[in-house]
Structure formats: structure tokens, C-alpha cells
Amino acid sequence: MDAQVSDLTRLTAADAAAKIASGEITSVMLVEAYLERIKERDESVMAWEHLNPEYALEQARAADERRAFDQSTGPLHGVPVGIKDIIDTYDFPTENGTPAHKGRQPGEDAAIVSALRGAGAIIMGKTVTTELAVFYPNKTRNPHNLEHTPGGSSSGSAAAVADHMIPLAIGTQTGGSVIRPASFCGVYGFKLTHGTVSRTGVLMQAPPLDTLGVFANTVEDLGLIADCLTAYDPLDSWMRPRSRPRLREMALSEPPVDPLFAFVKSPAWDDYAEDTTRDAFPELVTALGEYCDEVELPSVFAEGLKMQKVIQNADIAKFYGPIAEKSPGILSDGLVERIEVGKSISAVEYNNALDVREALNAGLEEVFERYDAIITPASPGPAPKGLSTTGDAAFNAMWTYLGVPCTTLPLLEADGLPFGVQLVGARHDDGRLLRNSRWLVEHLNTSGDND
């Protein structure tokens, strides 16, 4: 690869946007560099479902023309973004990872895609998703080792950012579909508070759980793109009018006092934590010293894992059951089995799962009265070998169920494979979570430099 191309694809999104704004580089130069990287790597990684190089360059040329006339449109002006292929785009197919929707062409953008265009982003293409954003793997491979899973369901988004094919990408999470692939692929991931980002035009799987998230290579970049997505949308009934958080500004700000973290093993630890995780996290807590205490959640939080599955499975049956009935044999056996499980869940069980969530959140808020964020694994360990699974969401599902914001920080490695540290924040305190995430990364990097 040409050295200039390599340099451009290693820019952070914030730096790329600044260089385009100043005229140091053009959007065309940046998009051409990423297209060259994709040409070189995607035959192996297979992160992209729909890509139109000429159309990407057409958007970039238009962005450069607007900048030449001092008509820059926003904080992502000229910067390319990848969109998970369950999010509607009027100019690309949205096939939801299933043959049942092959050739599906939406008539308009999802709300968040419109927001990205309004911020000046180049919609580079559609990234690979698992089947209907559930667990059945698609074609994407882990760029760190092609024999390992990239995670899912936002497989292509995480892999494309990790392999420097794109600086930013959008994903979704109903169980662990942002935080886990970010962990496996060694990038930064951010799942916002449930109800903070519109899901209008996004494939619906389980409305009480479905949440938008983003992938990037720095905490600042997480805030940069997330800032563009948080406008109130009355068409999403789970959203409420709120002042828009200044996420990038908060991510870059200094905390008034050094944060105090709670290391929480979570109910998943005993059954799911691999040896690498069991070794790494006590070392991390020791390294943080006075900035971290180990905290054990009450045993009732184990209900969170069970209740998340109740809601997800019941809604999978509701939303995907008609597809299975209309097109027998088109869905994977595993998904059909999950639909059948969902059909057996009663309305009483479903509503109880919603009620339990509020009780658990009340208990969690007591933790956040003392601690600034929770530290916990982002995945059981590094990405499993093989492509028949996307890994387990056990360390993510409870936090998704509770609707709290989470980040993945790519701080750990074992046998040449990355795996992440998950930070969990209080609901609607997404900016402070980003600030604490940046503080933690910088603190550990500084401590490592002094060892």
C-alpha cells in the first residue's frame, strides 16, 4: 500500500475532519485511500455487503465542492461512515442479512442516516450483519486472525473499523452486538443509553432492548459521531424530548475529580469468564489501585440475564415469526428454534421482565451514587476460533436489558488477539461515561509508560 494511503487511513475521524476543513486534504483523497484499503483487504475480511466506489467518490467530490464555496455542512464533512445493513438507506439496498429480504430497496433513509448526511458524512456503504441481527454468522472474519469470529451481529462494522477500511461505523445492540464485536476486533465501541438515538428505519428485533451504537478508533471519535445521532425523533416511541448531550466535548473534558471505578464481575463471571479474563481483570484492578474497588452486585441481578432473554426471544417470535411462516426454510434452523421458544413465552412473563428491569435499575443507581462507572469484561475472552459462532453476549446482555450506556476499550490482548474492557455508566449520563473512558485509557497508558 502507498505510504500516503496508509497515513490517511490511520487518521482519526476528528483529525480527518479537521484536515478537510482546513484544506490540507480533500474528501476525495480520504475516500480514495479507504477504497484502496478495502480493495486490498476486503476479499479476506469480507466486512462489506454493499459498496459502490464511484458513488462514494461522487459524494466526496460534492463535499469538496461545498467546502470550496465555504458551505461545509457539519462536524463530519467529507468523512466516510459505514452503515450496518439493517439500517435503511435510500441509495443502497438494506437486506438485513437474510435471503428473505434480498434486493430490498428502502424508499428513504433511516433517521440516523439522514442525520449523518446532515452532518456532512459520506455514506460509504453497508456493512455485513448476521442473519436479522441475531446470532447466525455471516461471512465476515476477524481482521486480526481470519480463522476467528469478529463477533456479531454488527460484524462488518467492527471489522471494517478495526482493519482501517473506514474510520467510523454504525451498529446496533439487542444483546451484545456492539460491545462484543468491538472487544473481539480491538476497537472502541459505544452503545448509547436506550432511547437516546432514533430507531426509525432500523430493523426492529426487540423494541425495549434495541439500541444504536458506534465504532471508532478513539474515544473522541465515538463522541464525534454519536453527537450527530441524538436528535429527538417523535416517531420512535421509546424516545423522550431531552437536551442533546455534548458528547465529544464531554469526552475531551477533564473530570472535576479523579473518577472512582467499581469492578463488577457480573452474574456472567462464574459460568462464562475465560482464563485470560480471570487473569487480566484482577491485574487491571490492582493497576488502578485507589481508583477502583471490587463491588459485588446483589444476587437478584442474575435475573437480568434471564429477563433479557425473555424479552428478546418473545419479540423475535413477534417480528421474525411471520418471515418464517411466509418463507419456510429461508431462516437458519437456530433462528427458527429461537422463534419457537419465543412463542411459548406468556404475556405475564414478558411484562414481568419489563417490571424487573426498573427494580434492578433502582439498585444500580445506588452503585452510581458512589462510583463514576463500572468496569467489567466486554466479552468472555478473545474472539473464539471458528466461524460457526459470533461468541457469547453473556457479559453484555444484562447491561443492554438495563438500558445503560456502555463502552468497549481495547486495552487487553492474549495470544495475538485483542479483547476489551467494558465501562458501564448511569442511564442518560453518556457524556460522563465517555469522559471516564478517555481518563481510564490515558491513565493506564501513562502508568504503563512509567513501569
Image (cartoon, rainbow, N blue to C red):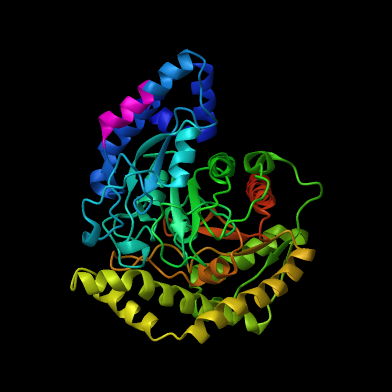
Q: Nearer the viewer, residue 235 or 136?
A: 235
Q: Position of residue 381 (x, y in %)?
A: 47, 66
Q: Is residue 400 above or below residue 451?
A: below
Q: Position of residue 61 (x, y in %)?
A: 36, 21
Residue 219 seen from this side: yes
Displayed quadrant of residue 254: top right
The magenta stretch spans residue 221: no
Q: Is residue 158 above or below residue 326?
A: above
Looking at the image, which residue sits at the far front?
A: 234
Question: How many numbered marks, from 0 up?
Answer: 0
The magenta segment is 52-61
Is residue 247 shown left or right of residue 382? right
The magenta stretch spans residue 59: yes
Q: Nearer the viewer, residue 232 or 395?
A: 232
Displayed quadrant of residue 404: bottom right
Q: Position of residue 229 (x, y in %)?
A: 53, 44
Locate the N terminus by quadrant: top left
Main secondary structure along the magenta-highlighted residues: helix
